[in-house]
Amino acid sequence: MHSPGIFDQPGAQATRALRARAYDLLAFDWDGTLFDSTAIITRCIQEAVRDVGGTVPTPEAASHVIGLGLMQALAFAAPDVAHDRYPELGQRYRHHYAQHQDDIALFDGVLPMLQALKSRQHLLAVATGKSRRGLDSALHAVELSGVFDASRTADETAGKPHPLMLQELMAELGVPASRVLMIGDTTHDLLMARNAGCASVAVGYGAHGRGVFAPLKPRYVADSVAALHGWLLDNA
């Protein structure tokens, strides 16, 4: 698999730029796909559960719920915590995350990838389990406010794997499902794409390992941002 980089020849770049688009809208998950936050989110979930006296989930169990809406994720990660303590559980998660949010950054190579896709006239969107407040804060912090054409968060629509996020993005941007590609690091992302009738690409460097994606038939599983960049330029 070709990975884009400084050794690309101008002719190859021009050929890619002229290649017809297979997809008009590329919808990206945020955490674990564009933003290098998986390890910190996993630890924050564990600490939040510990704070309220629940059984602390394993790293694998905590990372598995990344991509879901916050309260849905915490409910799965802490099944022995009483329902009436969920608000406190959510507050403790936000407390721990706030201590580390400035430590999180985009994966290396994400900005050049998004800029290259933008230059090909793709519409770019975010479909995330984050809150609207959390996404807007992240977009501002990494100076990405002008890159994406639209976004949806779990607290303003429906959490993954419900297809509503993608359905709303398609309606807003006027793109049919056959022209939409969802890119994400969890089975929740791929299930959402399937439920919406869209194709998907998985990344194996986020919350879920590459071995879990095969039953959901993504078009590709990328092991790095560079590999994802190359595949999207060649195939999207």
Image: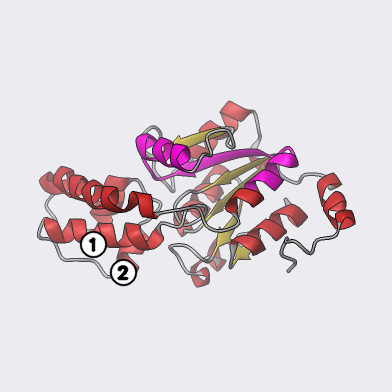
Horizontal relation, residue 104 to residue 119: left or right: left
Does the magenta portion include 125?
yes
Q: Is residue 166 above or below residue 226?
A: above
Q: Position of residue 40 (x, y in %)?
A: 34, 59
For residue 188, side relative to residue 119 (left or right): left
Residue drawn at x 49%, y 42% is: 127
Q: Earlier in the sequence, mark 2 or mark 1?
A: 1
Camera-nearest residue between 44 and 187: 44
Residue bounds of the magenta highlight: 114-141
Residue 59 is labelled as: 2
At x 75%, y 61%, the residue is: 6
Q: Nearer the viewer, residue 195 or 226?
A: 226
**Where residue 196 appears, x then y in whole percent?**
55, 43
Amino acid type of the residue tagged 2 in the rendering: Pro
Q: Are marks 2 and 1 in contact (CB under 8 Å)?
A: yes
Residue 198 location in percent, x, y?
61, 46
**Badge number at residue 124:** none
Q: Secondary structure at mark 1?
A: helix
Q: Residues within 10 Å of mark 1 (few under 14, many from 20)?
A: many
Residue 79: in magenta span: no
Mark-to-mark CA distance, 2 and 1: 8 Å
Q: Is residue 129 above or below residue 32?
A: above
Q: Which residue is mark 1?
A: 46
44 w.r.t. 120: above or below: below
